[in-house]
Image: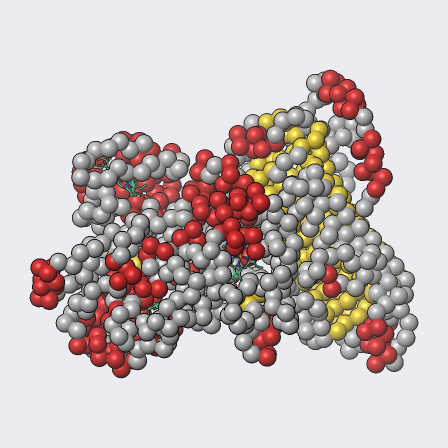
Amino acid sequence: MMLSLAAALALNTAVISLNSQCPPSFELTPQNQCLLVTRYDHYDSLHNKGVGGTKTALPKGRDGFSPQQIDLGRYLFFDPLLSANHKQACASCHQPSHGFSDGKALSTGSNGDIGTRSAPGLWNVGFLKKLFWDGRADSLEQQALIPLFAPHEMANTAEQVLADLASSALYPELFRQAFPLSTELDLSQVATALAAFQSSLISLNSKYDHYAHGYQQALNDQEIKGLNVFRSFVARCAECHTPPLFTNQQLAVIGTPEPEGMTFDPGAGNSPELSKLRGGFKVPSLRNVGRTAPYMHSGRFATLEEAAEFYSKGRGHAVPKGEKLLLHWHIWEPKLSPEEIQQLAVFLNTLTDESLMPVVPAQLPSGLPLPAELTTPHDHKGSTE
Amino acid sequence: MNKSTLTLIALVPLAYFAGYYLTSTATVAPVYTAEVSYSGSTSASGNGKKSVLNSMPTGTVHAVKDGQLIMDAVKAAQPGDVIQVWPGNYTETVYIDKDNIRLSGVIVEGKRPRLFGDGHLNDAILYSGNNIVIENFLITKYKGNGIMGQAGNNFEIRNNIIEDTGVYGIFPQLGENGIVEHNVVSGIEDAAIYVGMSDHIHVANNEVFDSVAGIEIENSRHAIVENNFVHNNTGGILAFVTPGLPIKDTVDVIIRNNWISNNNTKNFGAEGSMVAGIPAGTGILIMAADKVIIEDNLILGNKTAGIIITDHQNAPNTTLDPESDPTPDQIMILNNLMYNNGYDTITEAKVLLTTELKQGNPDILRVGGSNNSCINNPQQYISAGVGDWPACGFSNTDTIVNYLLDEPAAPRSVAVEDKGKYAYLGICTGCHAYTGRLIGPPVQVIQSLYMDDPKALADYIANPIKKREDYPAMPKQDYLDAETRKAVAEYMLSVKN
């Protein structure tokens, strides 16, 4: 990643124009909308819920954004201009090389504050009906504004975000391209563009998918064994992490532990009326889970083996003394063998597919450099333009 | 648990199997023909043999003999094939991720193929394909389920004996249009037959016993449970809405002509499981399900009550789910023969009866809310909570032969052109843009190279050779089948932007 002086100078004068083509896996309509097309469109699902077995349709995802909105969202997502001190972008905590999470147990805000939860990966996030670990947001648009203004995250204010965008050399023109019918740059456009970009993060072409669509050789013996443990009624992983997205999109109380010294996180059950959901978290999708360690809402487990082993250590074994949780009925004592736990981890790694990795912008419309986290060398395959 | 059969099997001397094996070559393989009825009666019988598949198997028959693996035959099988499993012991998990497979045990002189989990294998049979038939097996000693369906439609599970096998005996989940009939299932820690999140289901002529729940219809619609012998479980037949699942309701269930007796077995369900809260001695339990008809059952000797109807608030272990309606509405109780139920009931039941100034042993108990429910001839039962229900206005469900679909649920693959489009957009566009370089060369360039030769393009992608110095190698697309490769080639050559 190199931002040469010449390029930086050129950027100040050149008008970036937004991509007029849809990202891969999206088809452009005459109305300039990008509609998602995947091989799962061959199938259907009971009540269109998008849960089932190998050949089951996906739940309806977010699409219909214009190519320009998606591309604008890409710039915004990577641009630290959105944080108060111009140091942190969404991508700081949702890094392409970590499956759009940050590789940390708990995220660190732009001012160095350590948060209370782990940054989830964002692949396929456009299919999710509930967002955040506790499911408290219903849409990507609603979600997007929360980290912007959270003091322990990007710590910004609406006024400053809008002022910074409006006074940047390039953003006003880009917003005009993405929202040609609007006269003024506003926050809902920021939210829409971020939602548009995030819903283009599609990962559906893994080895597992090849198997699911009928290519038996896609998985080797160990991987098949792992798949069969995963969907067995002993481990029951697939009852909650249901294909094809590997989540049934429900809240479940499973009783994962917090890191040492951290207070208990009630998750979705954060009020007396919701006490039955105390300790309840959204079942996360496991696609690209091989990239998003450490695991669970507070990043307590470093590896997939540890995460899988949690389920076999006894119902409620990690629930703090004095906490009464209504643990989910599928949390029981499956007595998985060490080989089976290993096989589960092997299988979960077959859910990795980053073939539609978006391009990280080489230059940002704000003229700011990419956040440092994204420019240190690492092994991810995403290219820059 | 049926101890005597188990020991019998254990005692069968090896020599017997050896002897059988020698003579088995002479045994004629079964034929698969369409059902033919005795011609003599003129009106159609409600007992009509049901099928959800519209044709007989057309493919190859793969015979599997003792000592071989059923899975080897499944791997080799094509849609339409029959996998014929001969008597013997098979210790494996059979998984079928293909459509149109008939997994058919051969019964010879009473001996069936025995799937034996040896106490450590997880599930006996898993399927995710459509149009799957599983018949004539003996399944025992698995940790998980006997037969489990994951989103397979048009299934037929029949003539199986399942003993002492983990959590569920037969568990079709997220499927549509299926039959579970003539199975004998016992010794199961949860439900012997459990229909979960499925539509258009027929559960008939099964015997289920010595399990925590006999037959459970959960978060499913349009199900008939009829002519089953349901005895010596903790609870007999259940129609449930379990909150916290992606499909939220249970609607249109007919429970008729079942023999539901002596379901008084001590609850041995796993802690926290939904069935762990069922009081021993429950004949039928309705929780939050809607439009349930209970007709012409023999409900005998269930010590807590013949029928219990409850909402979520009064049930233990249920989580909070604003999307599922907690109230059982439109419960319709027609005539049932109820006798000798409720003779050793729970305190809550006695309290309920007392509030209605009644005494005796309850046949029917209702706790919590219920709207638009009805009951015929209530005076014949000792009941609490149904006193203000009106009569139903009809007395039988004879016109509803079953809730199966007239036509099998649609096959999964679609038009070939769509195959090409889905694969092109879902895969190729990740590396090929119409104009301009992505990871691979532009589609325009490819179009000029292959113009009228989609076949060459299809061949190339199955096994790409390195062509360009300044590009990386293209990964093989051999996981696409030949038809899809051809379709994607044609599609790629036809796109205009």
Q: Is residue A31 left or right of residue A279?
A: left
State the residue lying farthest toward the front: A261
Q: Residue at 18% across / 39% down in the picture?
A: B470
Q: Residue A92's spot in the image, x, y percent?
A: 32, 64
Q: Residue A200's spot in the image, x, y percent?
A: 33, 58
Q: Nearer the viewer, residue B57 or B190?
A: B190
Q: Is residue A141 visible?
A: no
Query: Exactly how many numbered labels are in the figure?
Result: 0
Q: Nearer the viewer, residue A332 or A285?
A: A332
Vertical order, A162 against A106 (above or below): below
Q: Residue at 58% across / 71% down in the picture?
A: A277
Q: Residue at 76% across / 63% down in the picture?
A: B278
Q: Is residue A227 left or right of residue A121?
A: right
Q: Is residue A215 left or right of residue A371?
A: right
Vertical order, B364 against B138 (above or below): below
Q: Residue B207's spot in the image, x, y percent?
A: 78, 47
Vertical order, A50 against B88 (above or below): below
Q: Residue at 24% across / 39% down in the picture?
A: B472
Q: Is residue B185 visible?
A: yes
Q: Is residue A142 left or right of residue B316?
A: left
* Colour approach in the figure: secondary structure
- In which quadrant of the rendered view does residue A172 lie? bottom left
Q: Residue B31's spot in the image, x, y percent?
A: 66, 28
